[in-house]
Amino acid sequence: MTSTEQPPFYITTAISYPNGEPHIGHAYEVIATDAMARFKRLDGHDVFFMTGTDEHGQKMLQTAQRMGLSPRELAQRNSDAFQQMNDELGTSYDRFIRTTDPDHIDAAQEIWRRMEANGDIYLDKYAGWYSVRDEAFHSEEDTEVREDGVRYAKETDTEVTWTEEESYFFRLSAYQDRLLDLYRRQPDFGAPRSRFNEVIRFVERGLEDLSISRTTFDWGVPVPGNEKHVMYVWVDALTNYLTGAGFPDVESPSFRKYWPADVHVIGKDISRFHAIFWPAFLMSAGLELPKRVMIHGFLHNNGVKMSKSLGNTVAPADFVEKYGLDQMRYFFLREVPFGADGSYNHEAIVGRINSDLANNLGNLAQRSLSMVKKNCDSSVPRPGELADADRAILELAAALLESNRDLYSRQEFSRALEAVWHVLGEANAYFADQAPWVLRKTDVERMGTVLYVTLEVVRRVALLIQPIVPEAASRLLDVLGQPEGAARMFAAFDMPLEPGTELPDPAPIFPRYEEPAD
Ligand code: ME8
């Protein structure tokens, strides 16, 4: 459901290299972006959420060669795996873009033509160090020869090779002042601040022109007018965000509606590409800039970097199977402040599931709803006059929408959840203090009021946690008698439960995690 009053909202993830199977880091990014997209939809925005795969470039080509496949076959196989991961994670993407899609090839060639027409592209010769793993150039002083006699990029620990060929260049150096000006005018163009500051410092040190084409392989988008060259994979990749909005048709309704993008959600290793190259390309092409680049941290398994060689990568599907999808979504977004690096381990996950989900939320819902079933004829009781304690907890719950809006606007998911669970903690204390199971024998009307107030707090919580735990929230709204549609949008947040609403039998929302018997 959309509303014409709220502005459209366009959000993207990075597009992943399908040179291997997706891992939990990829799942993390897409879950967070999905939560943001869902929040905005529930708040009445017309949302366009895009994710996908980045299929060209030398890394894809080399991996395919090692596996005895064509790069197209490798891309197809793993792009399917990425799409499947999204489906397993229940993400609500509107388009899964592949950089081999024909409309994307058109878009990449058009941005090239625009940058060329603006005088920012020239032909020269490139000679320097290239890291295929990073798909990035490194200056001589940023590399070193290590004990094994191999030269590495210091920052990323990846092998670099000397590359010398004719290449087109983009006049990135000419954009230093305009970029610094952008960062001053739009201080939240990049976030969080600490990660954005690293980007700013980098630009302040001065920018070199960027080699943006290759001639030694052909797995890429052909450079318009010179088919000996294919585009540097990052020119092609970044343009995907424009393709999704409808570029090159800048007059199309979708482009007018969705461009510029509201948020690009990306990981910390690719902040420079998004906060330096991307705005420079767009300025050169005469296009509007995205409003925000949100840089998240990396997930580590038990504090240890995940890598195939260490054998500690976890397939997202295994995670879902072991803990449950909503549980996994909740854990990552609650446990790791978005922007910071995060670690996960079994005990931490089980702790969150059992204390936050099963106890604080599941038990409160279950206990209040079972009392309503037994004592109120399975329908929402009519509250009597409200006492101070009732008003206090209702007010706390009522304030959550505004605070969540504010926190979501900065992708502060963990703080948004913390605020909700703080209210749940207070609601549990209220329920214990009021002891409706005692009132049942002493003051039935008061019992009804306490149950009403509790259900109303649970309803508000259920509405707000839909972006994070969509399945469980939906079951919770079912048992609260809230039909799908308008009653589940944030516009219904201030429309309290109707006394007399019939309620279906309560069903447990979040079971405790029990260790499997071995
Ligand atoms: O960088 N924890 O693709 P990619 C959290 N194709 N996030 C992680 C992570 C981890 N352990 N590992 C990777 C690319 N990521 C380019 C992007 S966009 C125009 C082109 C994140 O498959 C990473 O930071 O290497 C990036 O945002 C995304 O996963 C895809 O990484």
Image: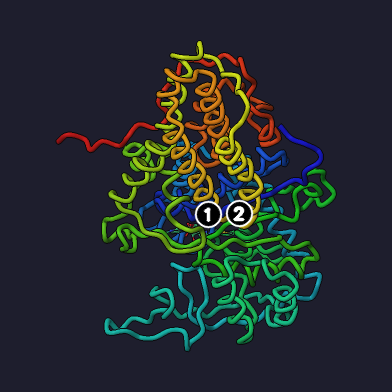
Residue placed furthest toward the right: 251
Residue 2, percent from left and from top: 74, 35
Q: Amino acid at mark 2?
A: Leu
Confirm whether residue 272 shows in the render: no
Q: Secondary structure at mark 2?
A: helix
Q: Is residue 340 left or right of residue 93?
A: left
Image quarter where the C terminus lies is top left
Q: Is residue 477 left or right of residue 77?
A: right
Q: Is residue 98 left or right of residue 516?
A: right
Identify the residue position indicated by label 2 in the image. 407
Foreground of the two, 283 or 102: 283
Q: Is residue 236 above or below residue 317?
A: below
Q: Secondary structure at mark 1?
A: helix
**Mark 2 burial class by Cα count in 10 Å: few <14, some 14-19, many 20+:** some
Q: Is residue 341 above or below residue 130?
A: above
For marks 2 and 1, give the CA distance.
7 Å
Q: In the picture, residue 485 is in which quadrant?
A: top right
Residue 150, percent from left and from top: 33, 81
Residue at 37% in and 46% down: 352
Residue 36, percent from left and from top: 60, 47
